[in-house]
C-alpha cells in the first residue's frame, strides 16, 4: 500500500532553514506528480507546493514563493522541500501527498512538525 513518511521537521528560529524529506513506497514514485501541504494550529489544510513527475515543472503558493523549493529524486523515491527564510507563520505540520494538489482526497503521510519560534 501507499506509504509516505515525512522527516526533517523541528524547531528553528525566524530566518532559519529546514529541509523536509518524504520517503515514498508502495507505488511507482516516478510516475506521479507530488505535492506538499501544511496545517497550522487551528487552521485548515493549506497547499504549499507541487512538482511534476520529472521535476521539470513546479508551483508554489504565494505565501512561500521565493523562499521554499520543492524537488525530487526519483532514483531514491524521495520528495524534498527546502525551506529558507522561515517565518513564524510557517509553523505547521507539513505533509507530502501522492498526486496533484487539485485532486481531492489524495493520500498523505503522517506529517512532520515545523515550529518557527524565537
Image (spheres, rainbow, N blue to C red):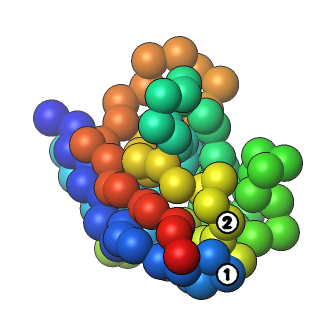
Label 1 with label 2: CB-CB less than 8 Å: no
Earlier-in-chain disc, 1 versus 2: 1
In the rendered view, would you say 22 is above or below 29? below
Residue 20 in the figure: left or right of residue 71 = left
Q: x, y percentage for residue 47? A: 63, 37
Q: x, y percentage for residue 5? A: 25, 54
Q: Is residue 100 visible?
A: yes
Distance, label 1 to label 2, CA atoms, is 6 Å
Q: Which disc, if any, is residue 15?
A: 1
Residue 36 in the figure: left or right of residue 95 = right
**Residue situated in front as seen by the camera: 114 or 37:** 114
> What SS does tag 2 mark?
loop
> What SS does tag 1 mark?
loop
Q: Which disc, if any, is residue 85?
A: none
Q: Is residue 32 visible?
A: no
Q: Which disc, if any, is residue 87?
A: 2
Amino acid at each position: 500500500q501507499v506509504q509516505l513518511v515525512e522527516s526533517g521537521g523541528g524547531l528553528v528560529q525566524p530566518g532559519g532553514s529546514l529541509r523536509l524529506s518524504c520517503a515514498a513506497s508502495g507505488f511507482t514514485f516516478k510516475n506521479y506528480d507530488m505535492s506538499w501541504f501544511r496545517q497550522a494550529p487551528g487552521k485548515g489544510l493549506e497547499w504549499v507546493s507541487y512538482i511534476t513527475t520529472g521535476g521539470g515543472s513546479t508551483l508554489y503558493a504565494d505565501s512561500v514563493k521565493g523562499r521554499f523549493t520543492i524537488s525530487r529524486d526519483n532514483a531514491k523515491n524521495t520528495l524534498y522541500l527546502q525551506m529558507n527564510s522561515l517565518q513564524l507563520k510557517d509553523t505547521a505540520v507539513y505533509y507530502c501527498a501522492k498526486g496533484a494538489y487539485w485532486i481531492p482526497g489524495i493520500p498523505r503521510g503522517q506529517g512532520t512538525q515545523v515550529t518557527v519560534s524565537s
